[in-house]
């Protein structure tokens, strides 16, 4: 009979494979064409043209007022870089209240978001992909809210941040998995709907955030240590050990 513990490694491997595949699917359309290659517009069947078609379908027409806009804008702070203050605050609260579980949540979520941000910011600077409004023009893109920084479209930082903390919380609180990933997915959808990113940007961001969260959960013993009495023959020492 197969136990839950024997299934976990296999599901973990598949989750990594799927996330890496999603990241690759996002990277390919965002990479600039090689010198001398045909322009993207001349290749109607490429992923880039599909990316643009999906963007227009989700973003809607310029000037259109959508009832979802206020809700999506309200969720954006949960994916902003400043959102790392939330897990840090949880850790501080846990320290003051003596709540070990709360401290763990704060540490894991902060570590996942920091790791995700490091990769995301590196790729943004390396790839320097134009925002949809830069590439397609203001007449074809509906931008809601403040305009995001130019040449930093890939990958989506809001999405990677959101999926980083969502993956950690879903792993620690399985009964809240649907809520965590639902909010993260809404943030990813909002980045396209509000005109800040292409679908491939948020696809890659989701993969990066998920991988960062899984990395932290799979190696959480390296983040937390517990001091425990270690009885000896004639002495009582203190042993430092890693734990899950």
Image (cartoon, rainbow, N blue to C red):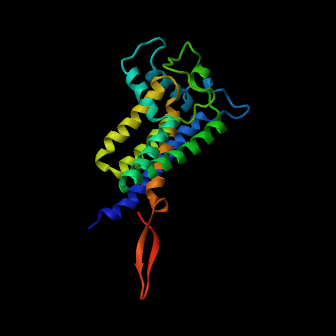
The residue lying furthest to the right in this view is 36
Image quadrant in which you'd find residue 127: top right
User: Is 201 in front, or is 213?
Assistant: 213
Between 17 and 164, the one nearer to me in the picture: 164
> Looking at the image, is 243 positioned above or below residue 81?
below
Quadrant of the image for the N terminus?
bottom left
Residue 66 x %, y %: 39, 16
Q: Percent from the top left, x then y, of residue 21?
A: 50, 46
- Residue at image location 45% in from the left, 24% down from the top: 193
Q: Position of residue 33 (x, y in %)?
A: 67, 33
Q: Residue at x 44, y 84 (%)?
A: 235
Locate residue 86 relative to residue 149 in the image: left or right. Answer: left
User: Which residue ends up furthest to the left in the rendered image?
Assistant: 1
Nearer-the-camera pick, 6 or 108: 108
Q: Nearer the viewer, residue 152 or 91?
A: 91
> Is 37 placed left or right of 194 in the picture?
right
Instruction: State the residue at coordinates (50%, 23%).
Output: 195
Q: Residue furthest bottom?
A: 233
> Would residue 211 be visible to someone looking at this image?
no
4 w.r.t. 49: above or below: below
Figure check: 85 above or below 186: below
Q: Is residue 11 visible?
A: yes
Q: Quadrant of the C terminus?
A: bottom left
Q: Residue at x 63, y 36 (%)?
A: 31
Total numbered labels: 0
Q: Quadrant of residue 44?
A: top right
Residue 239 appears at what percent x and percent y?
46, 74
């Amino acid at each position: 009979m197969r136990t839950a513990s024997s299934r976990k490694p296999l599901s973990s491997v598949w989750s990594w494979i799927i996330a890496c595949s999603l990241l690759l699917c996002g990277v390919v359309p965002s990479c600039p064409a090689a010198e001398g290659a045909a322009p993207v517009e001349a290749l109607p069947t490429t992923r880039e043209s599909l990316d643009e078609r999906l963007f227009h379908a989700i973003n809607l027409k310029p000037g259109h007022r959508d009832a979802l806009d206020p809700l999506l804008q309200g969720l954006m702070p949960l994916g902003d870089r400043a959102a790392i203050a939330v897990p840090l605050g949880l850790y501080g609260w846990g320290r003051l209240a003596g709540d070990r579980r709360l401290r763990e949540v704060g540490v894991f979520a902060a570590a996942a978001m920091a790791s995700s941000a490091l990769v995301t910011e590196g790729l943004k600077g390396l790839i320097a992909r134009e925002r949809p409004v830069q590439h397609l023009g203001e007449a074809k893109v509906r931008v809601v809210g403040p305009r995001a920084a130019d040449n930093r479209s890939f990958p989506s930082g809001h999405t990677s941040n959101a999926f980083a903390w969502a993956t950690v919380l879903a792993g620690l609180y399985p009964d809240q998995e649907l809520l965590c990933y639902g909010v993260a997915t809404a943030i990813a959808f909002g980045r396209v709907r509000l005109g800040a990113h292409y679908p491939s940007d948020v696809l890659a961001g989701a993969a990066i955030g998920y991988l960062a969260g899984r990395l932290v959960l799979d190696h959480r013993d390296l983040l937390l240590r517990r001091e425990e009495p270690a009885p000896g023959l004639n002495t009582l020492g203190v042993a430092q050990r890693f734990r899950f």
